[in-house]
Image (tube, grey):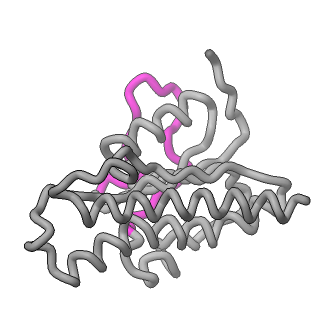
Amino acid sequence: MHIDLTGRKAVVTGSTAGIGRAIAEGLARAGAAVVINGPEPTAGRFGASGVTRPLSAGGFRRRFSRPRDARGRGGVVRASTGYGILINNVGTGRSTSFYEVNDNEWSDLFQLNVMSGVRASRHYMPNMKKRGGGRVVFISCESALAVPKDMIDYAMTKTAQLAIARGLVVRTSVERA
């Protein structure tokens, strides 16, 4: 199957490694100009093997774990026009006993895994709507429904992502009607 995204602009959060990088490379291979993001110093500057065009239309080094990460110089809000694809991928998790995770760790994980997608979606979706539409994807996993005993905090964030994504679908459907 060939997907042609020539002329489209995409933002992929958490895209300097792992799943996010693979998504960014796939979008670039399909012809999209892709803005990559991650905490690594190479954010915005790596080339993808097998990609004949530049992978990045830019990049920024933010994790979105705090509201100020999404604002201002170098943040997600630095540019928003023309983007029709947003992949909310940034996130983390680790296997830890429920009894060992303190309140700050719960909050930090929620800020990164959930609120980062909320902040990016609130920023990019209004311009997508003005342009007649776009695509917003939240990367979740089976832990949202099948909670691992040693990743309850992580599973909570993945379930929250599903609720946000479903809610945005309902909201968008109502706005179109």
Q: Nearer the viewer, residue 141 or 136?
A: 141
Q: Nearer the viewer, residue 159 or 54?
A: 159
Give percent across and percent down for residue 169. Answer: 69, 57
Q: Is residue 52 left or right of residue 93?
A: right
Look at the picture and state if 142 lies above or below 41. Answer: above
What residue do we see at 10% from left, 73% from top? Answer: 99
Give percent across and percent down for residue 65. Answer: 37, 74
Report the span colored magenta.
Answer: 41-63
Give percent across and percent down for residue 89. Answer: 43, 53
Q: What main secondary structure does the magenta stretch of the protein show?
A: loop
User: Is residue 73 located in the magenta-colored stretch of the structure?
Assistant: no
Q: Nearer the viewer, residue 77 or 3?
A: 3
User: Is residue 46 located in the magenta-colored stretch of the structure?
Assistant: yes
What residue do we see at 15% from left, 80% from top? Answer: 102
Q: Nearer the viewer, residue 108 or 96?
A: 96
Quarter that holds the N terminus: top right
